[in-house]
Amino acid sequence: LVAMDAGKVLASLELVNHPITGPMFSGPQQTPFVCAGPRRFNREPLVDSTDPTHFAVRDAGGATIGYSRDCTLDAWTEYVYMPVGGTTTGHYKPLPGDGSRPADMATTTLLDGREVDFVVRIERGTINRFIYQYYMLAPLGEDLDSPDTSHWNGRLIYSFQGGVGFGHYQGDQQNVADPGALGKGYAIAYSTGTRTSVHSNLVLGGESAMMTNERFVQRYGVPLYTVGTGASGGAIQQYVYAQNHPGLIDAAIPTQNYPDMVGQIPHVGDCELL
């Protein structure tokens, strides 16, 4: 990328197109790396290796057909709806595959006052080897090749999660489809790579958050602003990523926070041992 004036180069910047499997700057990726697709979604990862030290990919009969280093899952979309009287993430129901409107479907009122069907689009896939999820209200019968964002209020919540983990695993997806936020038209982004119970590498976590956010922007557009939420390790991530990656989140709502990751481990470990 070059900026010029009257034929004179004023500045230049080299752009690097990194693969969606990463890394960008976090360094060598862990191996072995255990894929979660078969257990969590009944989906086998893509074959990308012949090395048997990586995760075995199996066909419908259980025979190994290759190996997966990056645990890549092709992106897919599901739809759920909130029934009348539902108030929590556990109340969502799968939307009928024929596109019909369930008789018990609730409606919700957006920030601008419009009343719409409470239908949630869930996009899942893998970025930087971790499982990402995007949640957003969507009208019935939309074209997946051109997602309808008319029920989105333009604001994004990035859900960070805590715990302590040491990696080598892709991580379990979590249902972070908060009805209160989605019902007002907010979108929600999440990645197992920004959950410290999957790994506690905040360099890798920051990279994963940046890549997850970029994919959202490419798919749905630039948010008016992005708010981080999360407790414990999810709070620490908000502090660190706001410091190390300016512009990633515009506001943070950290709860149950503490000073740092490393300082906690000896005390917790010693208490369990004693």
Image: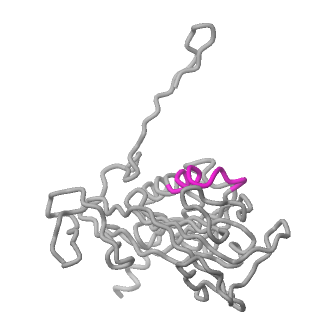
Q: Residue at x 62, y 7 (%)?
A: 6
Q: Nearer the viewer, residue 228 or 254?
A: 228
Q: Is residue 240 visible?
A: yes
Marker count (numbered) = 0
Q: Residue at x 50, y 68 (%)?
A: 77
Residue 5: percent from the left, percent from the top?
Answer: 63, 12
Q: Is residue 133 magenta?
A: no
Q: Is residue 262 visible?
A: no
Residue 53: percent from the left, percent from the top?
Answer: 16, 64
Chief SS of the magenta region: helix
Q: Is residue 143 above or below residue 221?
A: below
Q: In the image, is 151 to the left or to the right of 216?
A: right
Residue 118: percent from the left, percent from the top?
Answer: 69, 78
Within the image, what quadrant is residue 165 found in?
bottom left
Q: Residue at x 65, y 50 (%)?
A: 222
Q: Is residue 221 magenta?
A: yes
Residue 119: percent from the left, percent from the top?
Answer: 65, 75
Q: Nearer the viewer, residue 142 or 161?
A: 142
Q: Nearer the viewer, residue 48 or 156?
A: 48
Q: Nearer the viewer, residue 128 or 136?
A: 136
Q: Which span of residues is magenta-colored?
A: 212-225
Q: In the image, is 187 to the left or to the right of 32?
A: right
For the C terminus, the quadrant is bottom left
Q: Residue at x 79, y 70 (%)?
A: 110
Q: Is residue 80 above or below residue 235?
A: below
Q: Is residue 243 above or below residue 77?
A: above
